[in-house]
Image (cartoon, rainbow, N blue to C red):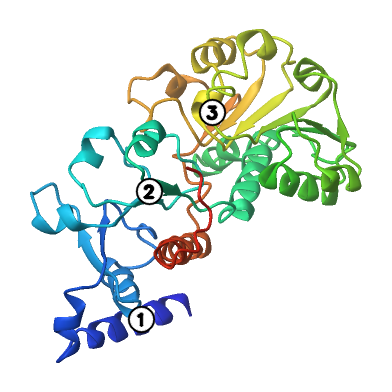
Amino acid sequence: AGTAAAAAASTAGAAALEGEDAAAGADWPIVVMLESPAEDAVPPDAVEGTFLAHELQVCWATGAADESHATAVAMVTVKKKITANLLDRHPALKLVAVAFTGYDHVDLEACRQRGIAVANVPDYSTDGTAELCFGLIFSLLRHIPLAHQHVRAGKWTWPPGSELAGKALGMIGTGHIGLRVAEIGKAFKCSKLLGYDIERNAKFLQLGGEYTLSLASLFLHADILIVGVALTEETRGLVSHKLMKLLRPDSIIINCARGAIIDQDAMTKLLQEGRFRAGLDVYEVEPLPADHPLRTIPESHLVTVPHLAYKCQESLRRRSDETLANILAFLSESPQNIVV
């Protein structure tokens, strides 16, 4: 249904530029696309058509000089960095529309200095991210990647794994993702829902969640830990070597948030020593370098995926729609989801 709607919007957008409307379209606001807000969930021509249907011209950034960039009023990025130099090449820019929840790749101070607003798309992938957390948990509890290879190798007999039911689930951050993880954990009959956050979430408490007095206490008492905070200057390196040393060999830590929240060098060393287990979707440097030692850690202790928690057809279409809505709201002088 989403693809059909996008195709219809594309047709409508193209039609809007036919005949007399073509001249009028020349005066429509220009949006520079560094990346498609829907990535590969929606074809670029369908994305462009949807914007055209709302009287917005789209200019795809190809790296070549383009005079239209100088008059662009909005810029769309997913993960590409927004630097002061890039902003200076777009002197008419008024809005950076980040088609992502995180915006740590945007030079916010440079935007402030130039009077450029920054909008993001919060919560579009809450369900997909929480679901992947449990995919990684079960991969480790039941050794699914190894069992798959075992069967492919023509083998059969397999040792027992562990249940999730009865485990204490700990959330580092009880915002939207932490809360959704807690809801799912309750359905799986986790014995405790523990959380640590500088702000207490009433909904987490209503679920039966308990807040620990310190982050160290969370690491000591949770069997499975979920990283669910945004990357900021305060949370960079939050999960430190000292905290990770508190974990047990059967402990699990899951990170589908941002790689730099965990001290990756310390984590790598401790995983090599078998001090705990981990499921990772994000890394301090992405793509993860081919020679990074994380790639050599046995799957019994580490399961890795290539930053795909947010990458669901449904969430990407939702993100694209919300990015367009953010631009339209800003141009209508009724901005939404503004972070700067």
Q: Earlier in the sequence, mark 3 or mark 1?
A: 1
**Residue at 23%, 57% in the rendered image:** 72
Res 241 → quadrant: top right
Q: Earlier in the sequence, mark 2 or mark 1?
A: 1
Residue density around tag 1, few if under 14, some if 14–19, many if 20 or more, within 10 Å: many
Asked whether the beta carbons under mark 3 and mark 1 sit within 8 Å of each other, the answer is no
In the image, taking residue 325 as reference, residue 136 lies left or right, namely right
Gap in angstroms between the C-alphas marked 3 and 1: 37 Å
| Percent of width and height locating residue 274 | 62, 13
Relative to 53, residue 216 above or below: above
Name the residue tied to disc 3: 232
For the residues carrying marks 2 and 3, which lies nearer the camera in this image? Answer: 3
Which mark is drawn over residue 149?
none
Residue density around tag 3, few if under 14, some if 14–19, many if 20 or more, within 10 Å: some
SS for callout 3: loop
Name the residue tied to disc 1: 9
**Residue at 50%, 58% in the rendered image:** 312
Gap in angstroms between the C-alphas marked 2 and 3: 18 Å
SS for callout 2: loop
**Residue at 56%, 36% in the rendered image:** 257
Q: Earlier in the sequence, mark 2 or mark 3?
A: 2
Asked whether the beta carbons under mark 2 and mark 1 sit within 8 Å of each other, the answer is no
| Percent of width and height locating residue 46 | 31, 73
| Percent of width and height locating residue 63 | 13, 46
SS for callout 1: helix
| Percent of width and height locating residue 332 | 43, 68
Type of the residue with mark 1 = Ala
**Residue at 36%, 57% in the rendered image:** 39
Type of the residue with mark 3 = Thr
Name the residue tied to disc 2: 78
